[in-house]
Image (cartoon, grey):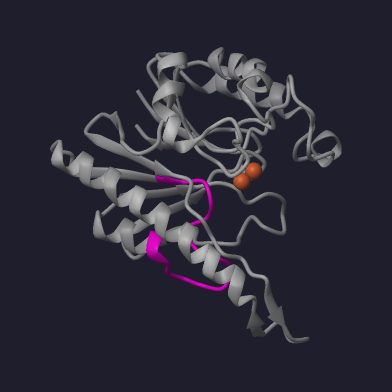
Amino acid sequence: MSLYAIGDLHLHFSSPLKAEAQLYDPLWKNHEERFKRNCENLLMENDTLVLVGDHSWGKNLEECEADFEYIRQLPGRKILTRGNHDMFWDAKKTKRLNERFKPELNFLQDGYEVYGDYALIATKGYTFEGPYYLNYKGEVVGYDAEKEEHAKKLVEREAQRLIKSFEKAKADGYKKFIMFLHYPPTNIMETDSVFTEIAETYDAKEVIYAHCHGYKRFHDSIEGEYKGRNYRLVSGDFLSWVPDKILD
Ligand SMILES: [Fe+2]
Ligand SMILES: [Fe+2]
């Protein structure tokens, strides 16, 4: 039994493709077939696969139906977390999604899923990436205060969701945690954030995130050991569409 994670499938079997590069970029070429094949070679039926957001380009459930069918056919238990492009998923209506798609698809938001003696906790997160104004040396000389104010509200909302989920799992007796965010835990300028602090407070063993695409963005945030926990980027193009094994 193993726990795997990967993010950003960005499927579009029945919706308009919103990123043309997906067709031609060598990182993305035929990624649906490559990913399916890798899952079939790697995963057993008693394994768990966490899909860390940005599942589909579909705007609503109808446009996602074929994408969900593709995910349903992958081996193992499937847990989906929210990404910034998942327009079909209103966080407040997660219960409805689960009523419709469980047990094949498990939509995780405001709560936890269990893997062995671990509680799996997930939220979308948020990173404010600017717009910073940089000088010719690349130093920050200003920022958009209005956008920063808006971003602070989003970060606070996501942090509260995360804390509530950790508290719920703790109240149910869980002591070991894996934390999933869709956005990276920090922006490119910082080494700490409310999300790294929450991971430390609850002693999450692993912090898994996705969202960063392409060689220019793969190293935007923390990777590897940092302050006693392990940080991993699992966006599909970064992993060459091979799910990353998190736990045995
Ligand atoms: Fe993405
Ligand atoms: Fe994303």
In the shown orientation, is residue 237 left or right of residue 30? left
Q: Position of residue 238 (x, y in %)?
A: 64, 45
| Residue sitting nearer the eye, 244 or 146 | 146
The residue at 67%/71% (across/down) is: 131
Residue 140 % position (x, y) = 65, 83
Where is 41 relative to 244, above or below? above
- Which residue shows up at 72% across the image and 29% down it? 31
Magenta stretch: give its range.
Answer: 180-195
On the picture, is 138 further left or further right than 242? right
Image quarter of the C terminus = top left
Please say if 63 is above or below 216: above
Asked if residue 183 is among those painted magenta in the image, a careful observer would answer yes
Residue placed most toward the observer, 155 or 223:
155
Would you identify the image quadrant in which residue 197 lies?
Answer: bottom left
The reply, left or right, for residue 197 in relation to residue 183 is: left
Q: Nearer the viewer, residue 185 or 141?
A: 141
Q: Quadrant of the N terminus?
A: top left
Residue 165: image quadrant is: top left
> Does the magenta run of residues contain 116?
no
Q: Main secondary structure of the magenta part?
A: loop
Residue 5 visible to an observer of this rendering:
yes
